[in-house]
Amino acid sequence: MATGVQVVFDCSDPARMASFWSAALHYRLQDPPAGFDSWPAWLTAQGIPESEWNSASAVVDPDGLGPRIYFQRVPEGKTVKNRVHLDLNVGGPRTAPPEERRRRIDAEVERLVALQARKVKTLEERGEYFVNMLDPEGNEFDVQ
């Protein structure tokens, strides 16, 4: 049996990052624990001061297939290139006509820019077309 994984982002604003990535990945914010109708209710019950409520957040695949994405607040900002990044595979099957894949990728790039992502550059390498982007806190990811 394979080991499950969670992807963790260090960031300055977990709520903002969770909002962006839930929309980018078609995920949803993780529900609060059983017995609580909201995260504020759970946080209050745990005695966590309101000033710490944005210390972490998480998004999950609504179908339960993809990894949980967790965002944790850290004091330092991002200073160098990511050593790991996400590739959003939206172009469809590699066997699809290149112009159809490119159309799907470009449409997704436009949607992500509207969500506050930034387009860095478009690349065509080894017969592949993809777009390098930055999320709202400057983390690199590719749309392919």
Image: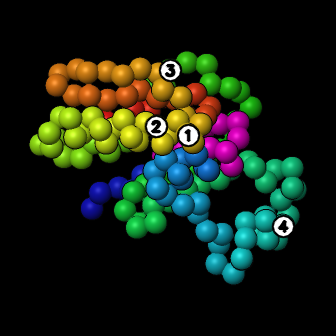
Region of the chain picked out in magenta, as a range: 7-17
- Residue 56, placed above or below residue 33: above
Q: Which residue is mark 1?
A: 114
Residue identified by numbered label 2 = 110
105 relative position to 33: left or right: left
Residue 65 to residue 134: above or below: below
The residue mark sitting in front, 1 or 3, is: 1
Residue in the foreground of this view, choosing between 14 and 48 = 14
Secondary element type, mark 3: loop
Q: Residue shown at 31%/21% (left/top)?
A: 123
Which residue has dot 4 on it?
44
Residue under the image location 53 percent in, 51 percent down:
23
Q: Is residue 81 magenta?
A: no
Q: Which residue is mark 3?
A: 81
Q: Amino acid at mark 2?
A: Glu
- Which tag, 3 or 4, sits closer to the chain's start? 4
**Residue in the foreground of this view, choosing between 75 and 21:** 21
Between the C-alphas of marks 1 and 4, the distance is 34 Å
- Decide which of tag 2 and tag 4 comes sooner along the chain: 4
Q: Helix or strand or loop: what does disc 1 sit on?
A: helix
Q: Amino acid at mark 3?
A: Lys
Q: Residue at point 20% right, 35% down?
A: 99
Task: For marks 3 and 2, give the CA distance.
Answer: 23 Å
Horizontal side of residue 49 vs 27, given as left or right: right
Cα separation between marks 1 and 3? 23 Å
Q: Nearer the viewer, mark 1 or mark 4?
A: 1
The first of marks 1 and 4 along the sequence is 4
Quadrant of the snapshot with the C terminus: top left
Give x and y (percent) for residue 91.
Answer: 27, 42
